[in-house]
Structures are given as structure tokens and as C-alpha cells.
Amino acid sequence: KERITDFEQKVASTYEKEQFGFSDTNTQTELSDERNQQLLEVAFNRVIEIANMIYKLQFPLAANAKNLQTPQQLLLALFRAKDYIYQYYYTHFNLDDLARTAQLSKYHLHRLFKACFQLSQKDLQIKLRMEKAKELLAQEHLPIHSIAHQLGYNDTAAFSNQFRHFHQQTPLQYRANL
């Protein structure tokens, strides 16, 4: 019998917690290898299901069958784009740059990305910037303009407006409430 890797066990126990509401860590660690393997297979099948959904979404866009990509290729392309955003969220990039990274057309990428991840590329970038902003604002020695610059904003006012829109309070108010 093959042993399950630590990563697979983490995926299986996370899925178990989300799917079945287990919050007791003892319950999760007592799960058998067989149950973890079953849960891993369920999670893997869900990924394949999402890939097939994405594949079906591309049919209306394809001019002919030669241009179609497999579900796995599309999923890899989308995750390449997502990884790029996670790696470079603090820089200025446009949809064309992201499309080149994913090796898809920008229109195709935008539509499939939103269908798969339930938010646009720009929304993901803003979300990552705002999460990092909260971390940086907790460091009281950092001035707001420095935080704005670190997150890719050239203008402190633009950063403050985006933060207020996202968190319903200004960066100064957020810092004061910590």
C-alpha cells in the first residue's frame, strides 16, 4: 500500500474540515489513510470538474477545433496567470502582460479567469494589495506614503481611496483602531 504524502494528507484533512465540518484536530489526525485517500480523490475529481467546466466555456470562443486546448492546459494557463498576480501584485501590469504569461488571448483569459476564480485579475491584485496593506499598517513606524509606494501606488491619495473602498475606513483610521 502506498503511503500518502504530507501534502496530500493536508489537502484531505482540509477538505474533510470544509466538507464535513470537523474542527477538532484530533478527529482530523485520527482519520485513516484510506479515508484520506478517498478525500484526496474527491478533491482531485473536483479540480477535474472545474477544468472540464472551463473547457466547455471555451467552445463558443473557438473558431475551429484546432484551437481548442485540453482542460488541463487551460487550468495550467489560469494558474500561471494567478501565480503571476501573486508574485507581482505590487507592480503595474495589464491584461496583455498576463495573457502573454498564460499564453491565452486577453479576452479568453479574462472570461475564463473570472469563471474559475469568481473575481477578475484586477480584483485579485487589489485584494492582495489590501491584505498586504493591513499587515504593513500594523507596523506603526512605516509612513502611509511608504506603504502606498511598496504596494505599487504612485499616489498616496489613490492608495487611501482604494483602502477606504475595500475596508470602509481610511488607512489612518485602521491604524488607530489596532
Image: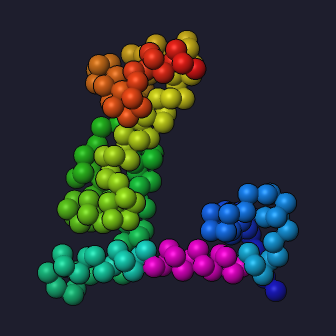
Q: Is residue 105 above or below residue 141?
A: below
Q: Main secondary structure of the magenta part?
A: helix
The residue range painted magenta reads 37-49
Residue at far left of view: 63
- Between 59 and 84, the one lying in front of the other is 59
Residue located 19% across and 79% down the image: 60
Q: In percent of the image, x 49 and y 33: which residue is there? A: 132
For residue 112, which quarter of the picture?
bottom left
Quadrant where the N terminus sits is bottom right
Q: Is residue 71 visible?
A: no
Residue 135, relative to residue 14: is it above or below? above
Q: Is residue 43 magenta?
A: yes
In the rendered image, residue 156, in percent from the top left (x then y), is placed at 32, 19
**Residue found at the far front of this picture:** 21
Q: Position of residue 158 (x, y in %)?
A: 28, 24
Q: Quadrant of the C terminus?
A: top right
- Name the colour scheme: rainbow
Q: Is residue 164 magenta?
A: no
Quick check: 2 above or below 6? Answer: below
Residue drawn at the location 39% of the way across and 21% of the way down: 170
Nearest the viewer among 48 and 2 is 48
* Residue 63 visible within the image: yes
For image coordinates 30% across by 81% down, the residue present is 56
